[in-house]
Image: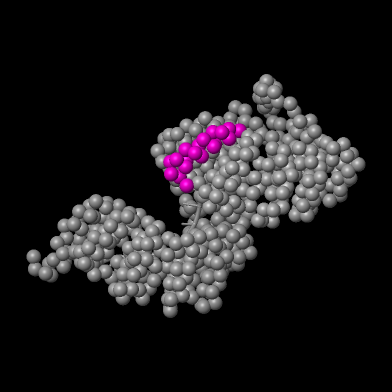
DNA sequence: GTAGGGTTAG
């Protein structure tokens, strides 16, 4: 073939490679590539980028290595494509090697290369120093450079740093586009800043990005994460266009706030042209777990199996959690055992399930199995494990894992874990130790920690520390009726009726009414929830029948009601 | 003929 025809055939092949990769027909693309007689840098690069855009990062990397072996001169297109593969593999050593090659070949001044380098360093290294170094070296930063920096900080969990970059971007009068807005809104959401979120929302409207779907979706998510679910819902209705992510975001927002709006919205989704996906189902199943509607969860499970979505790990994890929270731990276990692959969340969910059912020994056994399988435990695993020990009274085991996470896994316990350990010690009656841990922990104890301690003081009748804890909680939340109730009950159980009466008087003067604890029961696929003495609907006799059966079971296993708690209930109802 | 940053699931 004459040289011009070879060139023409090569261009045709390159175009075909691209279209095969877009259709995810990688084998056909590769076969074609292998048949090109003189493969130039463009052919190599399209094969590399074809692989990365389909998520085949390792294959893209191997391709790049082969290209080097054949001494094909790389260009800026090649470098930015292969950097994306390094980012996908999460291997910084590969990325920095490519960085070196970029310098050697004189393409490190190319904007695409610089932006890809930043992105790779930010994703693959622990900190942001290398990404920042590249960023500061860029003399004229474009919108992608800025957005990449904001996205990197946000994905690393530092929303404040992300907003600082955004502020600098505005000061330097760089061009803001829809990509910048969606990620900056995400940064506001990650730090729960309603104030910044609102300001950015105003700017979105002013600059005409209000109809961009990712921007709108980020706004819905931001309002939800800032605790403004009704505002999110209002905006959801105002949106000119809603895609599946919009619906999923709103459903998930309702789910996290504990509202059954998630289930209502899910049923409305069926009258739209959109079809629910794994994200939708995961949130809906989580809602079934929170609302303890087992029959609903089971129905969705049947749909999932029919649609062949039961291989999705996140969804299976949600089912493990749902069945456990609805009291059906055997179903949780069955799903866990049948999963072809599990992630750390699967292990956490099943361990939490056993823990909340009082089977700490099984949670501990699963922890051992998990480590044996090579899954690295994280903070939440230890949290589940310690709380399982706490609910089963396995204090020494709980303390062992508290030290274990620190010494063997180098995981610093967060405030919540300290709270969990305070609870562990307190429940077991080691109230003084719990108090000592509370005042020595490296965090300012919050009302949850003091609350756990107060609960322990009530259960183990330690009125001295109980008073201290209650006063701390009242400093943090002066109108908390439940704290007064707890404290007065501590006095009551000590027989200190004068102080009891004093507390009740104080409470009436300063507090809003204590929100009465609600009970719920599921009878024949219907969930009934009620407070003491409340009149229920037409099927009340079914509920009472079921309650009688439950009480009978409890008596048989030796349950003795704690009548001291009745003081609280009378007060709540009165 | 080859390259870019964004939104939903513990």
- Which residues make up the magenta segment? A358-376
Q: Give coordinates of residue A42: x percent, y percent.
A: 24, 66
Q: Is residue B3 above or below residue A285?
A: below
Which quadrant would residue A188 be assigned to in this image? bottom right
**Residue A227 in view:** yes
User: Front-most of A275 and A365?
Assistant: A365
In the rendering, at what x and y percent does residue B3 appear?
Answer: 34, 65
Taking the spot 50% from the left edge, 44% from the top edge, the residue there is: A345
Residue A399, given in percent of the width and then of the height, sits at 62, 43
- Is residue A364 part of the magenta span, yes or no? yes
Q: Which residue of the protein is positioned furthest toward the right in this rendering?
A: A498
Placement of A41 over or under A272, stated as above or below: below
Relative horizontal placement of residue A74, taking residue A208 as reference (left or right): left
Residue A135 lies, in percent from the top left, at 45, 72
Number of numbered discs: 0
A231 vs A565: above or below: below
Q: Is residue A276 visible?
A: no
Query: Where the C terminus of chain A falls, by quadrant?
Result: top right
Q: Is residue A221 left or right of residue A564?
A: left
Most frequent secondary structure within the magenta stretch:
helix
Q: Residue at x 46, y 75 (%)?
A: A136
- The figure's colour scheme reads one colour
Is residue A190 inside the magenta stretch? no
The residue sitting at 75% across, 37% down in the picture is: A459
């Amino acid at each position: 073939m004459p040289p011009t025809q070879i060139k023409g055939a090569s261009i045709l092949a390159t175009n075909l490679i691209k279209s095969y990769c877009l259709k995810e027909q990688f084998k056909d693309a590769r076969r074609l590539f292998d048949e090109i007689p003189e493969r130039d840098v463009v052919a190599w690069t399209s094969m590399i980028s074809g692989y990365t855009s389909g998520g085949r990062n390792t294959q893209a990397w191997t391709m790049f290595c082969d290209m080097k072996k054949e001494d094909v001169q790389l260009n800026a297109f090649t470098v930015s494509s292969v950097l994306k593969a390094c980012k996908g593999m999460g291997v910084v050593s590969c990325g920095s090697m490519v960085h070196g090659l970029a310098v050697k070949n004189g393409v490190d001044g190319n904007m695409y290369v610089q932006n890809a380098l930043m992105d790779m360093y930010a994703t693959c290294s622990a900190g942001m120093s290398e990404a920042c170094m590249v960023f500061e070296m860029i003399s004229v930063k474009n919108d992608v450079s800025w957005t990449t920096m904001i996205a990197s900080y946000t994905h690393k969990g530092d929303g404040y740093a992300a907003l600082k970059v955004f502020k600098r971007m505005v000061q330097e009068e760089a061009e803001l586009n829809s990509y910048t807005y969606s990620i900056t809104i995400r940064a506001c959401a990650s730090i729960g800043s309603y104030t910044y979120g609102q300001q950015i929302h105003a700017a979105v409207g002013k600059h005409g990005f209000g109809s961009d779907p990712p921007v709108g979706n980020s706004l819905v998510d931001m309002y939800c994460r800032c605790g403004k679910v009704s505002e999110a819902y209002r905006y959801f209705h105002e949106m000119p266009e809603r895609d599946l992510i919009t619906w999923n975001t709103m459903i998930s927002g309702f789910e996290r706030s504990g509202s059954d709006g998630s289930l209502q919205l899910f049923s409305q989704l069926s009258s739209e042209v959109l079809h629910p996906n794994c994200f939708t189902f995961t949130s809906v199943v989580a809602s079934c777990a929170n609302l303890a509607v087992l029959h609903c969860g089971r129905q969705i499970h049947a749909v999932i199996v029919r649609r062949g979505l039961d291989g999705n790990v996140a969804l299976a994890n949600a089912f493990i959690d749902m069945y456990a929270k609805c009291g059906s731990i055997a179903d949780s276990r069955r799903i866990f055992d049948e999963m072809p692959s599990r992630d750390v969340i699967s292990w956490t969910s099943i361990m939490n399930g056993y823990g909340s059912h009082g089977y700490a020994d099984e949670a501990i056994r699963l922890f051992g199995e998990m480590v044996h399988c090579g899954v690295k435990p994280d903070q939440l695993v230890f949290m589940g494990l310690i709380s399982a020990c706490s609910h089963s009274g396995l204090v020494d085991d709980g303390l062992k894992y508290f030290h274990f996470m620190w010494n063997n896994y180098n995981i610093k316990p967060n405030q919540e874990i300290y709270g969990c350990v305070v609870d562990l010690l307190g429940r077991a009656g080691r109230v003084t130790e719990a108090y000592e841990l509370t005042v020595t922990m490296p965090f300012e104890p919050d009302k949850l920690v003091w609350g756990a301690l107060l609960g322990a003081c009530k259960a183990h009748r330690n009125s001295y520390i109980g008073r201290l804890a209650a006063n701390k909680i009242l400093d943090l939340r002066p109108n908390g009726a439940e704290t007064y109730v707890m404290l007065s009950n501590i006095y009551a159980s000590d027989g200190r009726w004068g102080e009891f009466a004093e507390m009740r008087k104080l409470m009436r003067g300063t507090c809003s009414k204590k929100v009465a604890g609600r009970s719920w029961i599921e009878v024949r696929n219907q969930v009934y929830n009620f407070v003491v003495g409340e009149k229920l609907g037409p099927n009340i006799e079914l509920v009472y029948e079921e309650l009688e059966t439950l009480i009978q079971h409890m008596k048989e296993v030796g349950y003795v009601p704690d009548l001291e708690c009745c003081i609280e209930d009378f007060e709540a109802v009165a």
